Image: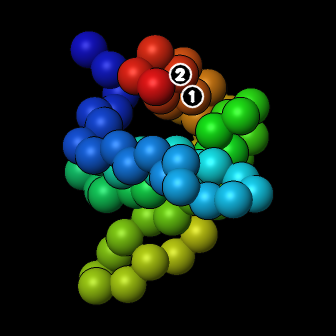
Amino acid sequence: MEPYEITNMIVDDDFAVEEYVTAEFTHSHKNYSITFKKADLEIINTWVFEDGTSIPANLSADLIELIREDVKKKI
C-alpha cells in the first residue's frame, strides 16, 4: 500500500515559458499539494492544507521521490 494517494493532478502546459505539474494528495490523513516543473520534475513548492488555510509542507525526501515517480508515469 502506498503511503499516500494522489487525488488530483493538473498539468499546466499552456504557459509560454515554463510548464508545471501539480499533484494533490492525501498523506497521514492530511491534504497536500506539490508542484513540479514539468521538464525535469524539480520541486517548485509543497503545501499542506489545515484548518482552511495552506502552509508550506515539510515532506520527506523519500515521499517526494515516490510522488515524483508516480507523476512521471502519469504524464
Residue 66 appears in view: no
Q: Which residue is mark 2?
A: 72
Toward the viewer: 31 or 38? 38
What is the total number of numbered labels drawn onto the structure image? Answer: 2
Q: Amino acid at mark 2?
A: Lys
Toward the viewer: 29 or 52? 52
| Marks 1,2: beta carbons within 8 A | yes
Q: Position of residue 39 (x, y in %)?
A: 71, 34
Horizontal side of residue 53 vs 57, given as left or right: left
> Residue at the location (63% across, 39% down)?
38
Check disc 1: other Cα within 10 Å, few if <14, some if 14-19, many if 20+. Answer: many
Quarter containing the N terminus: top left
Horizontal side of residue 10 vs 51, given as left or right: right
To which quarter of the image does residue 51 belong? bottom left
In the displayed structure, 50 sits above or below 46; it is below
Horizontal side of residue 4 vs 21, given as left or right: left
For the residue labelled by badge 2, is the local secondary structure a helix, a strand or a loop?
helix
Residue 18 appears in view: yes
State how far apart marks 1 and 2 are (Cα).
6 Å
Q: Amino acid at mark 1?
A: Arg
Toward the viewer: 38 or 50? 38
Q: Which label number is shown at residue 68?
A: 1
Question: Going by the picture, which residue comes out furthest to the bottom?
Answer: 52
In the displayed structure, 18 sits above or below 64; it is below
Horizontal side of residue 38 vs 51, given as left or right: right
For the residue labelled by badge 1, is the local secondary structure a helix, a strand or a loop?
helix
> Residue at the location (71% across, 53% down)?
18
> Residue at the location (35% across, 44% down)?
9
